[in-house]
Image (spheres, rainbow, N blue to C red):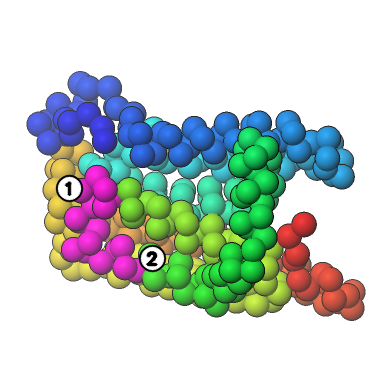
Amino acid sequence: MTAPASAHEGHVHNVALPWTIDPWIIVPLGLSAALYACGSLRFRPRSSQSRRAFVQRLATFWSGWLVLAGALVSPLHWLGEQLFTFHMIEHELVMAVSAPLIVLARPSAMLLWGLPRMIRRQAGRALASRAVRSTWKCLSNGTVATLLHGAAIWAWHAPILFDATIDSAPLHRLQHLSFFASAILFWWSVIWRSNRGVAAWHVFLTMLHMSILGALIALAPKVLYGVQTQASGTWGLSPLEDQQMAGLVMWIPAGIIYAAAALTLTALWIRASGKGGTDGTRIVAP
């Protein structure tokens, strides 16, 4: 996936940090960017949004896309293979920053309009089918999405499975795909599908169990992730210190993001309830 890990040879300070040139990452990122760029040009004349709202929507998507690309392609990805701390930062950028930004942008229409006409019509019919709509309705249910996202987080952070991703490129790709897909599903459910009060509760629960997992990693008395932390000495850290810092990343910064989202949803719910409206208690995707 990247150049050989020079950190293991003790020459990391003399080698430029490599970017990740992995077709399994580059191609989907490039394809999504091309579809969105093309689709936004085609969709704009048909959109009823104001120019300012449309530009904000574009900016939100591209911000999320750039964060995702930066996490998976920039030297941060390579550093994540060397230090557990950077690996955890990479994961939190994917799940807690990129995914909600992309969901807020509601990119499905633009991505669909980026397809050639014949394929777009076929894709539109497929997406409108009863089976697809029923499946999506089930998966995007707040409880289901929260459980799936939580299961992905806890399963992949099992030490034996997490360490296995360091030595297996396919497993590593699958891990990132699981995190991103479950995060998209989770954020879609809480932003566009659920009652705001219920959505706040789901975000709070996610913050709670992620904080517990981060605390367990940070406060563990021994090294749990032997393969992931084996290069830490080259960077001036002991394996246990690297593990503790990684746990703190999940525990505090990530927890703050989810807490802020939960508080925002709660405030919106209280404000809407105070006005006595019903539309304000539920966010409906256009």
**Mark 2 or mark 1: whose residue is earlier in sequence:** 2
Q: Is residue 152 above or below residue 90?
A: below
Magenta stretch bounds: 154-172
In the picture, measured across the screen, residue 94 lies left or right of residue 228, that is: right
Residue extending farthest left: 9
Q: Is any atom of residue 110 visible in this view?
A: yes
- Give the residue type at disc 2: Ala
Crowding near pointer 2: few (<14 within 10 Å), some, many (20+)? some
Q: Quadrant of the N terminus?
A: top left
Q: Is any atom of residue 55 visible in this view?
A: no
How far across and down, in percent of the image, does residue 196 sit?
70, 72
- Give the residue type at disc 1: Asp
Crowding near pointer 1: few (<14 within 10 Å), some, many (20+)? few
Q: Is 167 a magenta residue?
A: yes
Q: Is residue 167 above or below residue 143?
A: above
Under tag 2, what secondary structure?
Answer: helix
**Residue drawn at 61 percent across, 61 percent down:** 188
Number of numbered callouts drawn: 2
Q: How far separated are the C-alphas under marks 2 and 1?
A: 19 Å
How far across and down, in percent of the image, does residue 271 sit?
82, 71
Q: Which residue is mark 1?
A: 167
How far across and down, in percent of the image, does residue 83 sit?
25, 45
Under tag 1, what secondary structure?
Answer: helix
Q: Quadrant of the C terminus?
A: bottom right
In the picture, measured across the screen, residue 281 lies left or right of residue 180, that is: right
Image disc number at residue 63: none
Q: Which residue is mark 2?
A: 152
Instruction: Indicate the quadrant where residue 245 lies.
Output: bottom left
Q: What secondary structure is the magenta-colored segment mainly?
A: helix
In the picture, measured across the screen, residue 229 lies left or right of residue 137, that is: left
